[in-house]
Image (cartoon, helix red, strand yellow):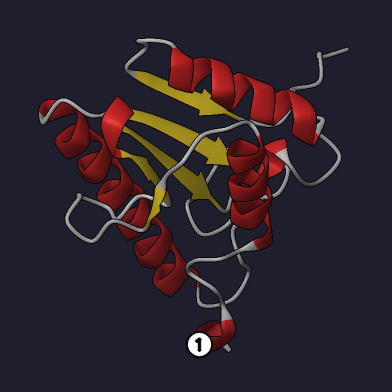
Amino acid sequence: MMAGIRGKDTRPEILIRRGIHARGFRFRLHARTLPGRPDLVFPGRRAAIFVHGCFWHGHDCHLFRWPASRIEFWRQKIEGNRNRDGKAVADLLATGWRVMTVWECALKGRERRSSELVLDELADWLRSERRTGEIRGKRRAAC
C-alpha cells in the first residue's frame, strides 16, 4: 500500500511547477546534491521549494489526523519525517540557500487558497531576498 504513495511528481507539486514556469521562472527538480532533495531548486537565486503533503509531514491542519491503528509505527514514521525536514531546512539555510515550504492544505481541502494566489506569493518570494517562508491553507477564525 505505501509503495503506491508518490514521493515526487504529486498533483500539488506539478501544479506549482506549471504555474511557476508560466511566470517565467526556470528551475531544477529534486536536486540530489542538496539536503532533503528539494522539489524545486532555483540555483541562480539560491532558493529551494519543498511541496509537502500534510499527512506525511505531520502538518497541523485539517488534512492531518493521526491514524487509529498501528499508532506507534505512524508516530515514529511521521516524527522521523518532521525531524528530517527540519534538518534539511537548517542545512540549506546554513549553506546560504533560501527555503520555502508549500503545504498541501494551501492547494487542497476546505481551507485551500486560490492556486493563483499561492503562485503569486511564491513568485514574490522568489524575487525577494527573504530567507524562509511557508504557504499554508487559510485558518478560519475562532467563533
Question: At which x and y percent is residue 76?
Answer: 35, 64
Q: For the residue labelled by badge 1, is the local secondary structure a helix, a strand or a loop?
A: helix
- Residue that lies at the very extreme toward the left in this rendered image: 95
Answer above or below: position of 26 versus 68: above
Q: Is residue 47 left or right of residue 25?
A: left
Quadrant location of the C terminus?
top right
Q: Identify the residue at horizontal 61%, vertical 63% (top origin).
A: 10
- Would you name the residue on which mark 1 appears? 3
Q: Is residue 138 left or right of residue 47?
A: right
| Residue 102 showing in the rendered view | yes
| Residue 61 showing in the rendered view | no
Q: Identify the residue at horizontal 77%, vertical 35% (top origin).
A: 115
Kindly identify the amino acid type of the residue bearing the numbered disc 1: Ala
Quadrant location of the N terminus?
bottom right
Question: At which x and y percent is residue 114?
Answer: 82, 30
Question: At which x and y percent is residue 121?
Answer: 62, 20
Answer above or below: position of 13 versus 26: below
Question: At which x and y percent is residue 101?
Answer: 47, 35
**Quadrant housing residue 88:** top left
Q: Identify the residue at horizontal 63%, vertical 56% (top origin).
A: 14
